[in-house]
Amino acid sequence: MSAAKRNRMRLIEDRLQQIACSPCADGTINPIRKLVDQLPIRPNPDKSFLKLSIGDPSVFGNFEPPAEVKNAVRDVLSGSCQGYEPAHGMIVAREAIARYYTTPASPLTFEDVYITSGCSDALRIAMDCIGTPTKHIILPKPGFSLYQTIAGNRGIPTKFYNLIPEKNWEIDLVELESLIDENTAAILVTNPSNPCGSAFSVKHQLEILSIAEKYGVPIIADEIYQGMVFEGESHSFGELSKNVPVLSAGGLAKRWLVPGWRVGWLVVHDRHQRLSAVRGGLVKLCQVIIGANTLIQAAIPRILSDTPPEFYSSTLSRLKNAADIVYAELKGVPQLKAFMPQGAMYMMVQIKVDQLADIEDDMKFVETLITEESVFPLPAGIFGIPNFVRLVLTVPEDILREACRRMAQFCDRHKRKH
């Protein structure tokens, strides 16, 4: 056999071996899905399984969008929204979003709006467009784990600033400022917060903007829970900013309770045209998937205009009531410390592991709690903070009370004997 034929045979044999995974795919890790998929889920067969883990308000059927939102989608079915539209969104939908978020201090036009396939896609596009393998993005800790998924997938380096539990999860501003250097691409902020359920005061938002302005750093604002504040005012970073460019990510998923509809948006606040090059990049990145769901896009003008104010206030009242219930139920449990949220749909609860026997961290707490009590909160280690759990507040009241009762029994049974 000739050398050429032997080489060809070896090449064929090599190609029949295991196919390698690309670095892009291999570097893509979603911590929540990884945990849920790998955590040993062995509930107590004698007790109903109570899931307080996934932030989907539609799971239990007790939180529904209003009839006006459903009717808006139903009525566009007979229209011409079956084909392709501009990849960065229908003009009528972008105009409606611009009107919805315009304030006297921050006027917007449809050219400031980019429609995406959910808020997560908006965050991906913003991070992709500003971050590079040599320019890092500064993220919150604890923070939504998808930020790391996006950064890891694209090879964007990250740094982390801490949120302070005892100060309603405000940013450690001294630490934040210390992390900024010439290679900082952006600061990412979340307000109101997943996982913390916190809502920054206007004073604190202005302090954050002041630091960003000092160093000329843009802000990526995850504001999917914008407006979902239990008490007081709710302002976006873009509305408050005078000089700092802000890319605000939002969408229909949470405030309108329709996460499966997969329509989000980026709203660009750029009063001094510092993001001119970025805007072109945003359009190109929207073109990767050729645009979001056109049926839902066509319904956006009516969704935003026809949703009754009572729907928003009722949703917030019910979430606040759920937070009050959990806080009251867990207040008397010595081994736990609940932190009262100010908005969104989550509550963080600290686990005092030094007061529990055989429970060394949040993962062990959750695994054992599932096994013994069939209650599944999310261990907050995946958000970057150990020995906390995140509870979802969109759960029906009877399930919330029962879950808290079981958690209290669990802690009493495992309390450390002194």
Image (cartoon, grey):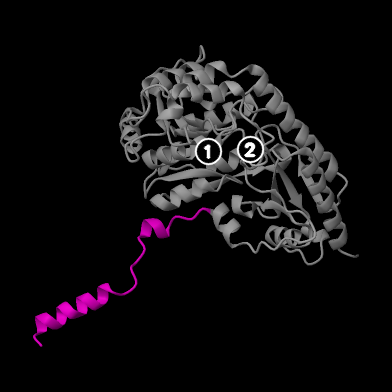
Q: Is residue 74 left or right of residue 155?
A: right
Q: Amino acid at mark 1?
A: Gly
Residue placed farthest to the right in the image? 418
Badge 1: how crowded within 10 Å, few (<14), some, or many (20+)?
few
The N terminus lies in quadrant? bottom left
Whether residue 319 is visible? yes
Query: How far apart in space, not on screen, are marks 2 and 1 (Cα)?
Result: 10 Å
Q: Amino acid at mark 2?
A: Pro
Give residue 64's quadrant in the image.
top right
As drawn, the label of residue 164 is: none
Residue, disc 2: 57
Q: Tell me where residue 16 appears, x and y as whole percent.
A: 28, 74
Tag count: 2
Residue appearing at x 77%, y 32% in the figure? 321
37 is higher (above) or lower (below) than 16: above
Against 307, residue 318 (above or below) is below
Which region is colored magenta? 1-30
Task: Locate the C terminus by quadrant.
Answer: bottom right
The answer to whether one can see residue 245 in this image is no
The residue identified by callout 1 is 260
Q: Position of residue 84 (x, y in %)?
A: 32, 31
Q: Residue at x 36, y 63 (%)?
A: 21
Q: Is residue 276 magenta?
A: no
Query: Is residue 270 placed above or below 392 in the rendered structure?
Result: above
| x and y percentages locating residue 117 in the rendered image | 44, 36
- Sequence-earlier tag: 2 or 1: 2
The foreground one among 414 and 209 is 414
- Could you say where residue 184 lies in the image, as x and y percent from the top left? 43, 42
Question: Is label 2 in a helix, a strand or a loop?
Answer: loop
